[in-house]
Amino acid sequence: MEIERWNGSNRDKDKIISLMKTVFGENEYSTKNYFDWIYEKNPQGNPIIVFARDSKNDAIVGIETIIPMNLWLNEKPIKSALSCNSAVHTDYRNIGIFGMLINEIQKLAKDEKFKCIYGVPNRNSHHAFVSRGFSEIGKLKIYGKPFKISKYFGNQSILKPLDYLIKKEKDQTKLEPFNEEFDLSYDSLLNKKIINDKIIPSKNKDFLNWRYKQHPTREYQTFRYTEKNELLAYIILRKTVFGNKQVAVILDFVIHPKIVEHKKIVKFIFSVLNNYKEDCIAVISTVNTECREYKILKNVGFMSVPKIFKPEPFYFITSILESFEGNEKFKVFDNWFLSFGDYDVF
């Protein structure tokens, strides 16, 4: 068994895509368009892709990948990476291949001066990461706002009285999504956010356009709140299936630090959510309870989602590859300003 790094070979790219099809079936992760988008068009830099090759038949039988996903702490950029797609062929599992890939990718990332790798592994891969240098520092906290409780249980009439307990806004205005490219106003908002002491992904215009406008298979909707031509808040959502039910997912939600009065932003969020309440049973989000964005969502009626509605835990792991100023903060989950859009599943 040989552990190699992908060098841009189209032949090996086809074999990697074939492995993804074998492991995950025919879906977006096993297409050339997805591969090109996530690994070759990321504006933050080139990926590190390592794979296991069976020298007997030249087949690629395992893969682990990271993509650059730079972070900010106290106005300083930290060169970081997100652990993305992992896969091992079923015929080659339980013989240590995945562990070798994790070890190799950390070594290569350190050689290229990455300071940190972070990710959200599934239940199957969680142990392998933690046993090879990654630390589980928490689990993503999932919050939701139901639109109709009875709808979740098939519109059972006996539960309809509970629908009246859901917090509503009298104004039923619907907002039209913002369909233009992300511009420099988003860079300006990012520059205001990185002043605080949270760890914040680099959500500049280039990243946002790549992540939400150029995705080859998914459609996202962006809504923005401005005053006097200044961007003060934006929120990005998409519809998906979560626990066999259609829900709206908040991928990103950012508000300007200068906002003190929350009433206008709360009204803005209610107007956004009016676009989804007919088709979706609920809207979900992940947000740090220490952030102002959480307080806004709480005012709108978001609450912690019970475990029975979660398909599996959203583990959050980090690997600090070398010491740097502020690295201790990276080991505390509450220091991270994260959203679903900061990793690749949604």
Image: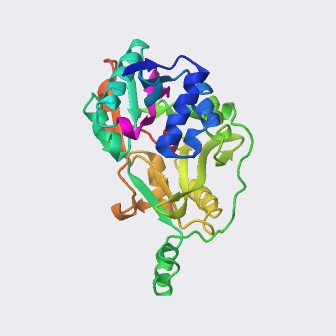
Please determine whether, in this image, residue 60 is positioned above or below residue 27: above
Is residue 134 left or right of 172 when viewed as pictured? left
> Residue at position x 24%, y 32% from top?
131
Across and down, in percent, residue 126 comes to 32, 40
Q: How is the image coloured?
A: rainbow
> Residue at position x 56%, y 39% from top?
30
Q: Which residues are magenta?
A: 65-92
Q: Nearer the viewer, residue 57 or 222?
A: 57
Q: Nearer the viewer, residue 187 or 177?
A: 177
Tell me, yes or no, whether the highlighted magenta stretch contains residue 67.
Answer: yes
Q: Main secondary structure of the magenta part?
A: strand
Q: Quadrant of the N terminus?
A: top left
> Residue at position x 59%, y 35% from top?
189
* Quarter location, residue 117: top left
Residue 191, visible in the rendered structure:
no
Is residue 61 left or right of 269 when viewed as pictured? left
Q: Residue furthest bottom?
A: 158
Q: Nearer the viewer, residue 179 or 186?
A: 179
Q: Nearer the viewer, residue 332 or 256?
A: 332
Across and down, in percent, residue 170 comes to 61, 71
* Quarter location, residue 9: top right
Please determine whether, in this image, residue 144 is positioned above or below residue 89: below
Across and down, in percent, residue 292 comes to 46, 47
> Residue at position x 31%, y 43% from top?
138
Q: Residue furthest right?
A: 180
Please determine whether, in this image, residue 298 is positioned above or below residue 342: below
Is residue 228 left or right of 332 when viewed as pictured? right
* Quarter location, residue 113: top left
Tell me, yes or no, whether the highlighted magenta stretch contains residue 261.
Answer: no
Q: Residue furthest top?
A: 111
